[in-house]
Image (cartoon, grey):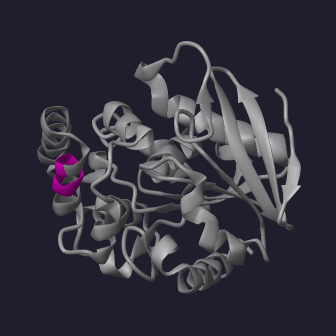
Amino acid sequence: MENTKQPIEGVTTGILNVAGAELYYETKGNGPVLLMIPGANGDHFIFTPIREILSKTFTVVTYDRRGFSGSKLVGEQDYTHRIDTDANDAAALIKHLTKEPAFVFASSSGALVSLQLMVLHSDIIKALVPHEPTALKYLPDFEKWKAQNQAVYDLYKKEGEGPAKAKFVDEIIPGAQDGEFMRGGKGPETPNTTYWFEHEIRQYPPTDFDTKKLEENKDKIIFCVGRDSVNTMPAWPVTNLAKQFGTEVLYVPGGHLGYALHAADFAKELLAGLQKRGKL
């Protein structure tokens, strides 16, 4: 595995070569490593505002998940086990950058990856904060939501990105401020969104996570929900899991994109939540 770095305005950039991909990542700050796993867009850029705050406490690591933005695919990909591959990529970054267990924050699709990261690599995690993973396994109406995701994909194939994104947003976070940002503009389809539609919207949410393994590590997990999300589907899986595990949910500002739209307040309450749980 190779690594190339250069300082840019306090940010160190690098490429980590892993099987099948070149992972682009950035680091900023000092202290214990905090890996931030992005959601559906797969791009590290979404974390830039909150990174500026959290880098005063952590060495914040942001990256593009494989197949998105700067993280190029190399050779054939195993799409039948892609969430495992995504989790292994995150583990490789942690192992590359620190010899100590790391903090992990992840949201939405990235939070699904982070749950699998905990299942497969719990020994390298000090604390995991999964923010609103749409883990359908933990919903009583699993089949309904799985069918809805398939319907969104079918609309994408028929009418394109715009109508499909609108349908997706209207189903998971109806009426939310965050939804306007998630819809995006009316420009051409982007490679990131195309990749997500083809390889994640149907595949990641139905993942059959090892719940027993997650429960064994419940003291490391701080399930996280935006206060504006409590009546929407992304809040329900982790709320149900926290109830099952007998743990508390960390409620934070905003909704599904609270970490981006309310970065300062979100960071403050995230840090407070970690301190309350004895992780800082």
Which residue is depicted at the point 61% across and 30% down? 72
264 in relation to 195, above or below: below
The answer, for residue 108, to whether it is visible in the render is: yes
Confirm whether the magenta stretch covers residue 166.
yes
Q: Is residue 155 left or right of residue 44?
A: left
Which residue is depicted at the point 33% across and 59% down? 184
The answer, for residue 32, to whether it is visible in the render is: no
Q: Is residue 63 left or right of residue 199?
A: right
187 in relation to 120, above or below: below
Q: Nearer the viewer, residue 146 or 176?
A: 176
Confirm whether the magenta stretch covers residue 109.
no
Q: Residue furthest front?
A: 187
Q: Nearer the viewer, residue 16 or 242?
A: 16
> What's the magenta bit mostly, secondary-structure-wise?
helix
Please give the range of residues in magenta.
163-167
121 in relation to 223, above or below: above
Q: Could you say where residue 43 lies in the image, as x and y percent from the top left? A: 54, 50
Which residue is depicted at the point 47% across and 28% down? 82
Q: Could you say where residue 187 lies in the image, as x and y percent from the top left? A: 32, 51
Q: Nearer the viewer, residue 87 or 51?
A: 51
Q: Splitting the image into 4 quarters, where does residue 62 fall?
A: bottom right
Which residue is depicted at the point 11% across and 46% down? 144
**Quadrant of the snapshot with the N terminus:** top right
**Quadrant of the snapshot with the C terminus:** bottom right
Q: Splitting the image into 4 quarters, where does residue 254 fall?
A: bottom left
Q: Could you say where residue 150 lies in the image, as x and y percent from the top left? A: 17, 37
Q: Nearer the viewer, residue 280 or 1?
A: 1
Q: Could you say where residue 262 lies in the image, as x and y percent from the top left? A: 49, 81
